[in-house]
Image: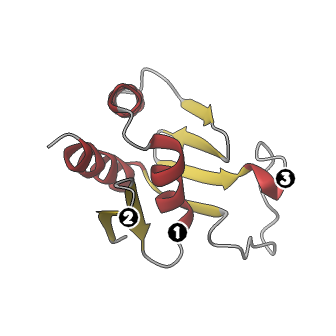
Amino acid sequence: MDYKFSTDEYNRPLAEFTMGHEAIGRWFSEELGRDKLRIEALLDIIQQLEQRRIIQHQIIGSEFQLRLHQDEIEVVALSLDIDVDEELAEDMNLYDEESYAECGLLDFKQAVTSWYEFICP
């Protein structure tokens, strides 16, 4: 999973993730933004998951829901209007890559840490 961070013409931070992970980039840009305290809280949640102190955690934002598990994360656009607590059938795929993405917890942690360093140099 590759990504790059930049700013737009209004100096707002933008995260761009590779194909299949675009929704994660949108979540960083639209839900995390420059909120240092929120990023620090997210890193704390990730640490709790890694240490097996919690099994899962979810964050519902204005546009996306982030579901964190001990081994992976999922970003789901609220506009998909699916029950994210139910697993998708094996033959069902979400085709809107800007609305859904998943990745490993370690990869996500590295991306969040990089975002934090980008936001708070």
The residue depicted at 39 percent of the width and 33 percent of the height is 35
Q: Closer to the N terminus: mark 3 or mark 1?
A: 1
Image vertical order of residue 66 relative to residue 101, above or below: above
Secondary structure under badge 1? helix
The reply, left or right, for residue 50 in relation to residue 71 is left
Q: Position of residue 81 (x, y in %)?
A: 85, 52
The one nearer the camera, 111 or 28, is 28
The one nearer the camera, 100 or 86, is 100
- Identify the image quadrant of the C terminus: top left
Q: Closer to the N terminus: mark 2 or mark 1?
A: 2
For this orientation, the residue located farthest to the front is 10
The residue depicted at 67 percent of the width and 47 percent of the height is 63
Does the residue at mark 3 contact the one at mark 1 (Cβ under 8 Å)? no
Q: Position of residue 85 (x, y in %)?
A: 77, 42
* Amino acid type assigned to the residue bearing label 1 in the image: Glu
Give how far apart the Cα atoms at labels 3 and 1 are: 19 Å
In terms of image quadrants, where is residue 10? bottom left
* Amino acid type assigned to the residue bearing label 3 in the image: Ile
Q: Position of residue 61 (x, y in %)?
A: 63, 37
Residue, disc 1: 22
For this orientation, the residue located farthest to the top is 53
Q: Which numbered mark, 2 or 1, is in the foreground of this view?
A: 2
Residue, disc 3: 82
Q: Closer to the N terminus: mark 3 or mark 2?
A: 2
Residue, disc 2: 9
Q: Residues within 10 Å of mark 2 (few under 14, many from 20)?
A: few
